[in-house]
Amino acid sequence: MIEPVTKSDKDFGLLVYASSFVGYLVPLGSILGPLIIWLMKREESAFVDQCGRSCLNFKLSLLIYVIISGVLALVGIGFIFLAILGIFDLVCTVLAIIKASEGKVYKYPLTIKFIAMD
């Protein structure tokens, strides 16, 4: 049986996604912000657990893409990829926040599944 998504669940799901913006101010903050909230609330809410897994999988995947782009920047092409990844991250995070406010888990594109989804 699927449990209903409460207002509190939506708020914490939204907070998981929004906390990834910390990464624009703090190194690795885009992973640490969602990780902290997910670890605190994953046992209390299946919705927050799914949001956290989804967000962390995406941010870890994005970190790998950024590292690869950084290496490619040494030969000149990586700068374009870094710019595209920045815009991609921003757009996907905003879409995830909107979905969470509707009580839905956002499925990020181009995501490697590091943390298994149920």
Image: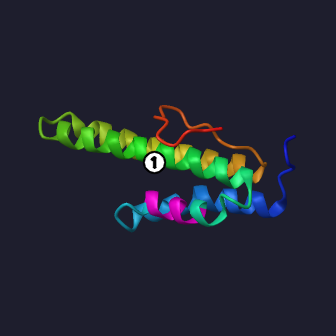
Q: Residues within 10 Å of mark 1 (few under 14, many from 20)?
A: many
- What's the magenta region? 30-37
Give x and y (percent) for residue 50: 65, 47
Give x and y (percent) for residue 32: 45, 63
Q: Image point 67% across, 58% down: which residue? A: 14
**Amino acid type at mark 1:** Lys
Q: Give the labeled residue for mark 1.
A: 59
Q: Which quadrant, please, contains the N terminus?
A: top right
Residue nearest the observer in this picture, 114 or 102: 114
Residue nearest the observer in this picture, 109 or 113: 113
Viewed as shown, does residue 79 lie left or right of 39? left
Residue 35 falls inside the magenta stretch: yes
Q: Which quadrant, please, contains the C terminus?
A: top right
Viewed as shown, does residue 76 lie left or right of 107? left
Tally the numbered discs: 1
Residue 99 falls inside the magenta stretch: no
Q: Is residue 27 above or below residue 87?
A: below
Residue 82 picture quarter: top left
Q: Image point 78% across, 49% down: which residue? A: 103
Secondary-structure class at tag 1:
helix
Give x and y (percent) for residue 108: 56, 38
Q: Main secondary structure of the magenta part?
A: helix
Most extreme residue toward the left, as rendered?
75
Give x and y (percent) for residue 66: 31, 44
Q: Image point 12% across, 35% down: which residue? A: 75
Q: How is the image coloured?
A: rainbow
